[in-house]
Image (cartoon, rainbow, N blue to C red):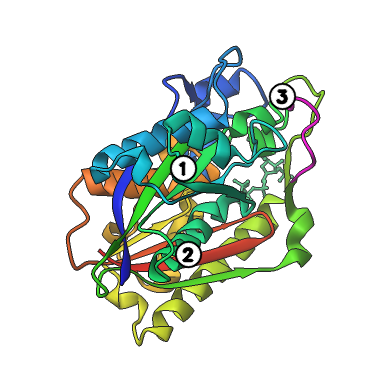
Amino acid sequence: MGAIISGLGVYYPDNVLTNADLERMVETSDEWILTRTGIRERRILPEDSPLKASDLGARAALNALEKAGLKPEDVGAIIVNAIVPDKQFPAVACIIQEKIGAKNAFAFDITAACSGFVYGVNLASLLIESGQCRHVLVIGAELLSRAVDWTDRNTCILFGDAGGAAVLSAGPADRGVIRSLLRSDGSYADILYLDPLLNSAAGKDGGGSCIRMDGKQVFKVAVTEVTRVVTDALALEGLGPADLDLFVAHQANVRILGAIGEKLGLPEDKVVVNVQRFGNTSSASVPLALQEAEQAGRLKPGMLVGLAAVGGGMAWGCNILRW
Ligand code: UT7
């Protein structure tokens, strides 16, 4: 039995924060942001919005279920990654379960930062292949703006808010996730982190914790390790990067995506890029980019698709799928 992606869903706030807006907030420029990151704008939930990470995730999940032609009751498990959870506990996955009415599911969160979606897809495929579940929701529910230091130009230009979700369902053995490979290295724990959030307004007024990052180091690890893990995963299937028809990696920086694509020898048209409009939305970024690729008709049955991500931990990994 295979685990196929039967539906993809997204939700992002209407509110757009442009580079010009950031120029008024910190010492930066549209030109610097564009050339160093490729980002033009990102979606940010307004400060006075009552929505939480679970709302972004729940809306994306309902969208994914609708695309899959399924009801919330059909879902057997919900796996969520949320860097800024609604509460320390219970899991955001349980809150989403209640919000969407997935009363037959068990639900839990994982902490794999920007790699949460590819980690979740790996776990979901195992639950399906073992026969434990028929349909599993994997959700990136990311409200990063609540943990951004809006006075730190090194980080505040990068991140955006979004929910991204996929339903994985039991399908034919020769389709869906054919190989996942996950890796992590805790010796990098201090190059990208967020200390415990002290209150829900964290980051906004200096009263809470904020995302801290050694950008240069993260950049290097990202390019080296994502290239390696994708190459290794493909090799385990007797395949190489040239066999990939489409590559959808975590959208952190257009230069990182370009460097990985180049190292893998992929032509530009095989590498999906939408970071320019959303910034880095952590674990929501892969489903967001994948859903756009699907809508644009870039995904066809039989294609070999690579999903990859890297982030805090550091934790990274990939899923190779036969679409
Ligand atoms: O999901 C994973 C999360 N994070 C990432 O993927 C981030 C990975 N890293 C990156 O994307 C890049 O390292 C950055 C975009 C964060 C930075 O680009 P860079 O080419 O590595 O720049 P840099 O850190 O070497 O900074 C170059 C200069 C510095 O000035 P000095 O020290 O050379 O005088 C920075 O202070 O640019 C300065 N700088 C800025 N200038 C204008 C840093 N941020 C800004 C800014 N506007 N927003």
Say which residue appears at 50% left-offset and 32% top-offset: 98
**Which quarter of the image is occupied by the C terminus?**
bottom left
Mark 2 is surrounded, within 10 Å at the Cα level, by few (under 14), some (14 to 19) or many (20 or more) other residues, namely many
Say which residue appears at 34% left-offset and 50% top-offset: 290
Residue sitting farthest toward the bottom: 238
Would you name the residue on which mark 2 appears? 122
Q: Earlier in the sequence, mark 3 or mark 1?
A: 1
The range drawn in magenta is 194-203
The amino acid beneath tag 1 is Gly
Query: Label 2 vs label 1: CA separation?
Result: 29 Å
Query: Label 2 vs label 3: CA separation?
Result: 31 Å
Front one among 321 and 108:
108
Check if residue 199 falls in the magenta segment: yes
Which secondary structure, mark 3?
Answer: loop
In the rendered image, residue 109, in percent from the top left (x then y), is placed at 60, 48
Kindly indicate the quadrant of the structure image that contains residue 13.
Answer: top left
Tell me how many marks there are: 3
Would you name the residue on which mark 1 appears? 38
Of tags 3 and 1, the one toward the viewer is 3
The amino acid beneath tag 2 is Asn
Mark 1 is surrounded, within 10 Å at the Cα level, by few (under 14), some (14 to 19) or many (20 or more) other residues, namely many
Q: Earlier in the sequence, mark 2 or mark 3?
A: 2
Does residue 31 show up?
A: no
